[in-house]
Image (tube, rainbow, N blue to C red):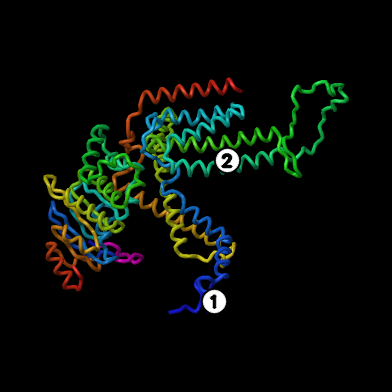
């Protein structure tokens, strides 16, 4: 039976059917004007089903063989060393971190991770480079002009030097803003990617146990060390649940075929707010159920409960030695090239 | 037993009476909301009955309907070992027990896998392994096959069936509303309106269900 409306151009029949020009033009127009809400949903659904930074046991690499405590020392040391390093060194550390991710993780994981984080780093770089030194100080300089001190022309550098690298209208990029942008972007990139590398190559149980061992001396001050370890462990487990819940809700919403254009920006935002509320409700419900299951499995409290099977594979002394030597080498390089 | 006889709560159990022979696979059938899960939770010690009493072999392991609610640890082996955390055991003992239990549910190859990468049926088998790790005398299993496909349903049922009986005399009380699962059972009960309406062998319960108009 012929439908009263053309399925391509949505106009009352008769129309030009398959060759309907309006339909083709309308289709192109629709593709170009896909609402932002629909694009956000499809972006969430396109993300890999493996949660960001969750443990990837295979393929087993050299990083898998390094002890979790050494990895945690690396994490802290890299951030501390970066704060003392030159911008070029900071950039070099970020690039090394990216290369290490490419060498360690499966392609499908590092490609998505580096693309997202790279985009974020690029945005930080652009905004910091253009905005951090673009507005001249309101107060006038109190230093005397070079012509008054008799130094004019006397201290010209051998090579031509320009403090302002680029200036057009209100956009002003200076050497200082570029240095700051490189530092901010590389610091952010390294902080996220190094933590991600650590989590993808170490089981959450080992990470929690390593942290517990680091903070063990605090037991003397009556700090609940085991509770801290268990909290970290459950948090890492919870990350997966949050990821899964967001995906499930997005999938449910996408399958409902919501007319985003008809809802308008306010309606769209309202739907997303409701979705957020629903997500928290579901997560709370899941937490309650997990707590019930823990009780059913004999959990009475972190102090009375031992967490077993925390080590998947024994760490390799060779990998540990290489990791420690590399950390010492990095520290030496940072202090040499300051 | 009765549960929920206060004015602010619906009466879920209204004089439920059930006897299960030790070392058997007993299926508890019934429509949604008839009180099957509540009865199981009372037997597992998660709820207190308002009146009545029960006697059950200890220790007993409880496996929930949704394995995502049961699995606590991020890795398979660590999750199976979670229940053993309340005992003072050496790491080698725990490792041996976990390996043995994972073998029982045919999951020994997945010991180091992150739990979020498992299929629904595999998660269910990990949850069963977690309950089995403590060498329970009774397994309380709450609609384990609700979220799994036909293949996984069979795997989960066979995993449970393989541990029932034996020298340990393990008893399984399996709650379901899928009638085709009766073929795995030694005995069964039909529950409705908070009461056990009929108990007997799997074949007798199948006949009873047919008399009610069900396609078994």
Give the magenta-colored segment's residue range: B2-11
Mark 1 falls within which chain? A
Front one among B111 and B131:
B111
Q: Are marks 1 and 2 on the same chain?
A: yes
Image side of residue B180 versus residue A304, left or right = left
Q: Is residue B33 above or below residue A221?
A: below
In what quadrant of the picture does the N terminus of chain A appear?
Answer: bottom left
Q: Tell me, yes or no, whether the highlighted magenta stretch contains residue B210.
A: no
Q: Residue at x 22, y 45 (%)?
A: B106
Depth check, front residue: B78 or A29: A29
Return the residue at label 1. A15
Gap in angstroms between the C-alphas marked 1 and 2: 50 Å
Q: Residue A324, percent across and down? A: 44, 23
Q: Chain of mark 2?
A: A
Residue A182: quarter of image: top right
- Element type at mark 1: loop
Residue A37 visible from this viewpoint: yes
Q: Is residue A121 left or right of residue A159?
A: left
- Vertical position of residue A113 compared to residue A253: above or below: above
**Residue tagged by mark 2?**
A121
């Amino acid at each position: 039976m012929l439908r009263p409306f053309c399925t391509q151009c949505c106009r009352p029949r008769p129309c030009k059917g398959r060759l309907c020009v309006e339909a083709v033009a309308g289709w192109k127009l629709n593709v170009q004007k896909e609402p932002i809400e629909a694009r956000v949903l499809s972006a969430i659904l396109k993300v890999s089903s493996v949660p960001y930074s969750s443990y990837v046991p295979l393929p087993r690499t050299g990083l898998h063989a390094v002890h979790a405590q050494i990895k945690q020392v690396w994490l802290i040391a890299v951030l501390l060393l970066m704060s003392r390093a030159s911008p070029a060194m900071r950039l070099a550390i970020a690039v090394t971190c990216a290369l290490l991710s490419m060498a360690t993780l499966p392609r499908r994981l590092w490609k998505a991770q580096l693309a997202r984080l790279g985009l974020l780093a690029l945005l930080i770089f652009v905004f910091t480079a253009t905005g951090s030194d673009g507005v001249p100080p309101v107060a006038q300089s109190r230093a005397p002009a070079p012509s008054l001190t008799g130094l004019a022309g006397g201290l010209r550098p051998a090579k031509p030097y320009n403090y302002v690298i680029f200036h057009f209208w209100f956009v002003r990029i200076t050497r200082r803003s570029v240095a700051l942008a490189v530092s901010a972007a590389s610091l952010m990139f390294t902080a996220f990617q190094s933590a991600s590398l650590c989590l993808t190559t170490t089981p959450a149980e080992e990470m929690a146990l390593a942290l517990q061992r680091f903070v063990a001396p605090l037991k003397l001050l009556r700090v609940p060390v085991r509770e801290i370890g268990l909290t970290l462990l459950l948090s890492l487990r919870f990350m997966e649940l949050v990821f899964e819940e967001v995906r499930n809700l997005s999938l449910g919403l996408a399958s409902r075929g919501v007319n985003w254009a008809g809802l308008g920006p306010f309606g769209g935002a309202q739907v997303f707010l409701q979705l957020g509320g629903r997500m928290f409700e579901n997560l709370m419900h899941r937490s309650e159920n997990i707590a019930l299951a823990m009780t059913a499995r004999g959990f009475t409290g972190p102090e009375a409960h031992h967490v077993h099977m925390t080590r998947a594979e024994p760490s390799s002394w060779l990998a540990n030695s290489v990791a420690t030597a590399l950390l010492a080498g990095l520290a030496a390089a940072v202090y040499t090239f300051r | 037993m009765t549960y929920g006889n206060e004015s602010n709560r619906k009466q879920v159990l209204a004089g439920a009476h059930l006897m299960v022979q030790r070392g058997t696979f007993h299926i508890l059938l019934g429509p949604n909301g008839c009180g099957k899960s509540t009865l199981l939770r009372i037997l597992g010690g998660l709820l207190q009955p308002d009146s009545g009493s029960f006697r059950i072999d200890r220790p007993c392991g409880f496996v929930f309907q949704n394995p995502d609610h049961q699995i606590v640890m991020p890795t398979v082996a660590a999750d199976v070992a979670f229940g053993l955390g309340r005992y003072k055991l050496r790491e080698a003992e725990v490792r041996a027990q976990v390996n043995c239990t994972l073998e029982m549910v045919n999951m020994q190859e997945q010991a180091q896998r992150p739990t979020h990468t498992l299929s629904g049926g595999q998660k269910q088998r990990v949850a069963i392994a977690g309950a089995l790790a403590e060498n329970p005398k009774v397994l309380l299993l709450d609609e384990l096959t609700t979220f799994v496909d036909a293949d996984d349903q069979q795997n989960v049922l066979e995993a449970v069936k393989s541990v029932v009986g034996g020298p340990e005399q393990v008893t399984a009380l399996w709650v379901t509303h899928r009638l085709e699962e009766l073929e795995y059972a030694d005995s069964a009960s039909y529950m409705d309106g908070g009461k056990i309406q009929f108990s007997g062998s799997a074949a007798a319960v199948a006949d009873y269900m047919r008399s009610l108009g069900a396609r078994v």
